[in-house]
Image (tube, rainbow, N blue to C red):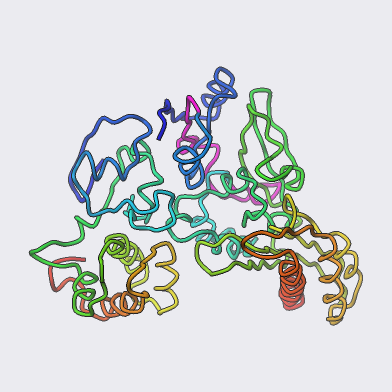
Amino acid sequence: MTVNGQVRRAEVPAETTLLSVLREAWGLTGSKLGCDVGDCGACTVLVDDLSVNACLLLAVQVDGREVLTIEGMGGFDYLHPIQAAFERLSSIQCGFCAPGIVISAKALIDKNPHPTEQEIREALAGNLCRCTGYTKIIEGIAEACRAPVGTDGSA
Amino acid sequence: MRSFEYLAPGSLNELLEVIRDRAPDFKLLAGGTDLLVELKHGPSDPKLVMDLSAVPELKGIEETPLGLRIGAMVTHSQIQQSALIAEHAPAMMAAAATIGAVQTRNMGTIGGNLVTCVPSLDSGPVLVALDAQVTVAGVHGRRVLAITEFFVGPRQTALAPDELLIDILIPTAMLGRAAAFRKFGLRKGQALALVNAAASIAVDDDRIIEARIALGAVAPTVIRATDGERVITGKPTDDVGALREAAAVAVTEARPIDDFRASAAYRRELIAVGTFRVLEEALALATSS
């Protein structure tokens, strides 16, 4: 499969989840294992531009498809506008949910560059955060939508 | 997860051949939002998991001479975004929007939702209100069933061990029929329904000529409240009292349970409110068109 623009290969037993392959075979540990049943959204990645729970997909189901994880969103050289806004507004506390939330926010903004607060809340219904109470996360996403896109070399 | 063999047949015939050889020791993988949980944490220990995503016969939404056909592998997100569903059966979009969260709607399929057959399944009530049929196929051929015959009990459908759900049909007569859906849960996202209600209404000359009321999560399967339907059939379209009476009668047709999410008494209140609201909404749609 193509992960963050790079072709990756792995030979794994059929029962291996996409999340296991990302984390254990390829060391992409940004996507988190939270509930392991599709409730918490900490493992959210994009597969062919759709947000999905990597814990509920078998790796073999993603054979030949395109995956985006948090590692493909930004890094020390530059931050994606969502990440930059989260940093500016202190949207994150422990950070465990943040990779999944950034991916869900990207999936939303790619389709709907100017979401309402209600649309942001609905887009995050599958991402649980136990620290922040969501307010600053929602403000961060709204802020990212106001920032000019692409000035930091991303999005 | 326990180990299993994985196959992704490329056609229905190929799939049915494997089913003939391997039934009943296999599991079918649609969106996986229930099956993967079951494989990880449940009692399920199949030798073989068959991924349905490469079977073309299970895909797509299309108009046919018989009605609107929805492939079993169509996801809830695809239902939300379908122009054909928006035109012919928009209440299905309202139901799809209440399922899980974005991730689960992107993965989960309408066929998978129906086959799990939990009493609270959100796709069911609107399909019952729209008199949907389902096609099932097996080693010995195809059958068409009314959706109400497909639901047998909690986690139990009419599917034989060597059969699978192929598609759902909204019959031509029901396309564009005024219909509404309401879900009551403990919160908006990721919640199981405490009560689901759906209704469809047809009017003629300021009278209700046909009404269907469907309730979910209040009995072992999705049920039709036929006594409630009879209360309003033939009534003038401005008879709000009849809608209230129909809702009260629908309550008596349900068999809600007490559990940790809600008491049966609270569910009965929700059935009355939900039934009234979907009837009111469906009637408003029917009289405005």
Question: Quick check: A145 left or right of B194?
Answer: left
- Horizontally, residue B44 falls left or right of residue B2, namely right
Residue B289 seen in this snapshot: no
Decide whether residue B51 is among the magenta residues. Answer: yes
Query: From where the camera sits, is residue B209 visible?
Result: yes
The residue drawn where x is 52% and y is 34% is: B44
Q: Picture coordinates of residue B58 (x, y %)? A: 55, 40
Tell me where residue B152 sits by quadrant. Answer: top right
- Farthest residue to the top: give it: B21
B238 with respect to A67 (left or right)? right
Rendered view: B96 above or below B150: below
Outermost residue on the left side: it is: A77
Percent of width and height locating residue B245: 87, 74
Quarter of image, res B230: bottom right
Whole-percent x, y for residue A82 in the image: 24, 71
Residue range corresponding to the magenta coloring: B46-70
Q: Is residue B260 above or below residue A135?
A: above
What residue sits 53% from the left and 22% below the top? B18
Q: Is residue B32 above or below residue B266?
A: above
Camera-nearest residue between A124 and B258: B258
Q: What residue appears at the point 54 percent right and 57 percent down from the top-left corner?
A: B79
Side (left or right) of A151 relative to A102: left
Q: Quadrant of the C terminus of chain B?
A: bottom right
* Residue B214 within the segment the image draws in magenta: no
